Every structure is written in C-alpha cells, then in structure tokens.
Image (tube, rainbow, N blue to C red):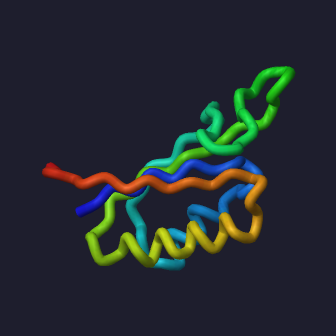
C-alpha cells in the first residue's frame, strides 16, 4: 500500500476529487485552506494580504498498482496549468488498522 499526498491550488476546485472518483479511488481525506510555498518556482499561497491564494490537499491510501495511474493524471493536469501549482508525493504504508 502507498499513501499519495496531493497539494494543489484551490483554483482546481473539485477536479482532484473528481479525478480520484473516475479512477475508482474512493477513500481519501481532503483539507481546505492549506498554506504553503512551492520549493522550485511556486508562488506562495499563504492567505494573507501579500499572498492571498490558498491551497487544498488530499491524502489517499492506494494499492501499489494504482500509484502510476494516479500520478499520470496529476502530471497531465499539472502540464495543462503549470502556474497553478500541483504536486503529488508518495509514501510507503507500513501498516493499517
């Protein structure tokens, strides 16, 4: 099992959740109004007067074989709108209850 953590500009709206649903990935947790700044060339999203934009984030736990499919969709969405900011990170899941 793997955890996929996806952070994205709120301008994506529900597109990330819809993408997961289309890929039959039902289980996820979503956070709204998440602040942060990209490590490469991202514009800060801090919710203040200087940087008013905010991010959302999703965490989903998936079987190993679904990782590539989800990352490919995230990559394609990012290529369409590079300036918005969209990142996905994958971790190993050691155990679940």
- Numbered circles on residues, count: 0
| Residue 69 location (% of width, % of height) | 44, 78
Residue appearing at x 37%, y 70% in the figure:
67
Q: Residue at x 57, y 62 (%)?
A: 17
Q: Is residue 96 left or right of residue 31?
A: left
The N terminus is located in which quarter? Answer: bottom left
Which residue extends farthest right? 49
On the image, the x and y values in percent for residue 92 come to 24, 54
At a point 53% along the width and 78% down the height, the residue shown is: 22
Residue shown at the point (44%, 51%) measured from the top left: 5
Q: Is residue 97 above or below residue 23?
A: above
Please state which of residues 50 and 60 is positioned toward the viewer in this rendering: 50
Q: Is residue 83 left or right of residue 64?
A: right
The extreme top residue here reads: 49
**Front residue of 78 and 8:** 78
**Residue 50 sits in quarter:** top right
> Looking at the image, is 84 positioned above or below residue 74?
above
Q: Quadrant of residue 43?
A: top right
Report the side of 82 relative to 93 (left or right).
right
Spot occupied by residue 27 in the image (x, y as percentages of width and height) = 38, 61
Q: Residue 84: percent from the left, percent from the top? A: 75, 53
Q: Quadrant of residue 62?
A: bottom left
As drawn, the residue found furthest toward the front would be 40
């Amino acid at each position: 099992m793997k955890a996929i953590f996806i952070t994205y500009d709120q301008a994506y709206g529900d597109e990330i959740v819809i993408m997961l649903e289309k890929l039959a990935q039902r289980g996820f947790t979503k956070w709204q109004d998440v602040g942060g700044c990209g490590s490469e060339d991202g514009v800060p999203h801090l919710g203040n007067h200087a940087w008013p934009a905010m991010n959302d984030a999703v965490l989903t736990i998936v079987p190993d074989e679904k990782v590539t499919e989800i990352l490919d969709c995230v990559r394609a969405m990012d290529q369409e709108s590079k300036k918005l900011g969209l990142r996905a990170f994958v971790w190993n899941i050691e155990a679940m209850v």
